[in-house]
Each structure stands twice: as C-alpha cells, then as structure tokens.
Amino acid sequence: MPQYDAIILGAGAAGLMCAAVAGQRGRRVLLLDHASEVGKKILISGGGRCNFTNIHTAPDRYLSANPHFAKSALGRYTAQDFLALVERHGIAWHEKTLGQLFCDGPARQIVDLLLYECAQGQVEIRTGRSVGAIDHADGRYTVGADAAPALVIATGGPSIPKMGATGFAYDLARRFGLKVVEPRPALVPLTLPPDQALFRELSGVATDVIARAGKAAFPEAALFTHRGLSGPAILQISSYWRHGEPIQIDFLPGRPANWLAEAKRANPRTTLRKTLADALPGRLAETLAEQLALPGELANLPDRKLQEAERRLAGWPFLPNGSEGFAKAEVTIGGISTAELSSQTMEARKVPGLYAIGEAVDVTGWLGGYNFQWAWASGWAAAQVL
C-alpha cells in the first residue's frame, strides 16, 4: 500500500496551494480530484482572467458564524504574498477596480503556476477518478488503496454543479462528527416575483447603484435580467440577503438633499422623466418616472412631492422571491463549522489529522478575489503543519 504524509481531496485553489506548500516542505503528498482536470473553477473565474486576489483583503470582508476565525490564516498569508508568487512566475497582472487583481492573460496561467509549484514539491496528482471508500483507524486515513496520517478536505461547496461541485465535503465532515453550518448560495443573482415584472422588462439595463440589505451596503453596478436582478452590487448583497427580506436600491447615489427641488428651480419647464434620463439609462428613467407617477413639468409639482420621490429613488424596495441558486452562485455561504477547526492549522479539534480548507469551510468572502485569497491562505496554513 503506497504511503503518504498527507492525502488532499480536491484539486481546486485551496487543494493545489496546500499540496504545493506541503510538498515543498518535504511532505509526500497525494492530491486527488474526481474532475478530469485540476482547477476548473480557476479557469472560468474573472471572465477567464482569474481575479486571483484582492489587495484590500481583511477579515471584515468575510462572512462566517465566527467572524474572527479567518484572521489568523489571512494575517499569515496575505494578498501581497500571493502577488509575489504571481510575479515570480512572470505573470502580468492589473488592478481592475476596488483592489481586484486579474491576470492580463488567461486564467490558465494561475493553474500552471500551481501545477509547477506542486511539481517542485513532487506532489502526486490523480484526476478523473472517484474517491473510493474512506476509512480512519490507528491514526491513519485510508482512501481506496492509499493511506496517510493526514487527510485534507478541499472539495469546495455545491456552487456551480455543472463544474462538478457537490456537497461531498459536508457529507464527509458529518461522517467524522463535524458540524456543518447550513449551506446556501452566495454571490448569486436574485429573482423577482411577477408583481415586479415591470422591472424584468428592463432586461439588459445596467446602472451604478448602492444596494442595501440590513446594515450591509455595496456601491457598484446593478443589472436587470429577465428573471430579476444581477450585477456586482446585487451579487454582493445576495450574501447578506435572507429569504423574505427586502433589499433597497439607491438609484442615484451621492445626490444631496432636495436635489429635485433644485432641478425644478434651475429648469422649471423640465419633467421628472427628463431629469432622471439625464442621470440614468433611458428605459430605466422612464420606468421609474412611471412608477413615481408625477407627470407634467417640475414647476407644477410641490417640493414635498419631489422630496418623497427623492426618498423612493434613494431606497427603492425590492422583495426578491429567491435566487438563481447554486447553479449560478459563485460561492457557498456556510459549510464545515469553524467551531470544529483550529484557526491556526485548519485541523479538526476532535479528529486528529483531519483538516478542512477553502470553500468547504464556513468562511465566505466578498466578490472580487476575496475567496481565492481565503483558498490560498487556508491552504497555506494547513500545509505548515502537515
């Protein structure tokens, strides 16, 4: 029976990182994945350019039942650390917006980087085969015909099932007695009910907004779709939205109080529709003006009516009836409970030698490279002790 120091299940971002670092520390590592090739999610990320990290990475940009859990790993392996690795490999990159770093070329470069690092650590990689029976006895984990004293769960969550994603990590964790925080789709488009069909007729229209849910607020673009709402601002707020709760959209962020009354004084003959069309896409301006039902010239509208219109435009309520689910979710909220794991090593507290990293764990980042940084950092942290 081949013997290894560690068997890692899942050759995505976290699994590849963990394998490479552990291998280069002299550990004999076996990396297994049921997919035909490694890093499938990396290849499609960032529109094929891989948004590989975010320079503004901080623990408060992650959701978890324990908001402090991610601090240790993120503090010890930073965005600058991964960027240095990217630059060592001569990969050209650029900052897009809000600290998001992308490859200039294809995402394949990041996969090739990780495969090179794994090769440097003499990691054995097997793809395209299902994981056999997993057993644990006498301090050793047996996976099919292979065994090791350490087993790392790096199989991610169920988001994007067409890429082969499943809830395997949770089933395995439960088998070993670890609690799982109920998973739900995150960074996902939201759907609107039939009574808001008027807005679905705006499919394809995008504009910069502030999206809010509870205390969370994100200033980015929103996109109307034939099913509801999408775009970066909506994907971000979806992680904070809970079913049955409204979200609010500020369609004209940054406007001062009484800006409509000022517009009336500056140009009394203009209409609300024309005023909105000066700042918003035409179809959206028309729809909002119809909804506000303030026809005629601004000169004929009292200031209190204009103030009420301002309030509605600054906090337009939508009540989504759901999301587009794991099929369209970029990541998963929830997962293996952080209460079960050491934040220093990612090892299960009650099951020596069992580790969980990456998206399989109940740590979920914002849109924009944060989830890759968690994959690199958690994989690195586990690799220090394998």
Image (cartoon, rainbow, N blue to C red):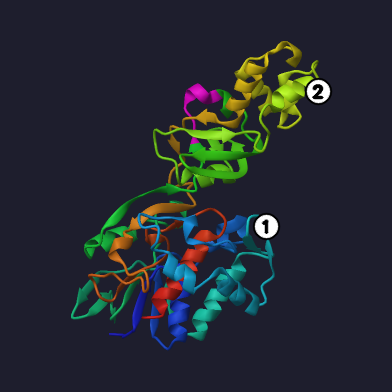
The numbered mark, 2 or 1, whose residue comes first in the sequence reads 1
Q: Residue at x 81, y 20 (%)?
A: 267
Percent coordinates x, y for residue 42 in the rendering: 54, 63
**Mark 2 → mark 1, Cα distance in angstroms:** 37 Å
Q: Mark 2 falls on what kind of element?
A: helix
Q: Residue at x 59, y 43 (%)?
A: 231
Percent coordinates x, y for residue 123 in the rendering: 44, 82
Percent coordinates x, y for residue 101 in the rendering: 63, 62
Q: Is residue 298 above or below residue 346?
A: above
In the displayed structure image, the side of residue 154 where residue 268 appears, left or right? right
Residue identifier under label 2 = 266
Percent coordinates x, y for residue 28 in the rendering: 39, 85
Q: Is residue 7 above or below residue 236?
A: below
In the displayed structure image, the side of residue 19 where residue 96 appears, left or right? right
Q: Mark 1 falls on what kind of element?
A: loop
Q: Nearer the viewer, residue 76 or 136?
A: 76
- The residue segment tinted magenta is 191-197
Q: Is residue 245 above or below residue 288?
A: below
Indicate the quadrant containing the C terminus: top left, top right, bottom left or bottom right. bottom left
Q: Nearer the viewer, residue 12 or 369?
A: 369
Q: Which quadrant of the structure image shows residue 292?
A: top right
Q: Residue at x 22, y 80 (%)?
A: 139
Residue identifier under label 1 = 96
Q: Amino acid at mark 1?
A: Lys
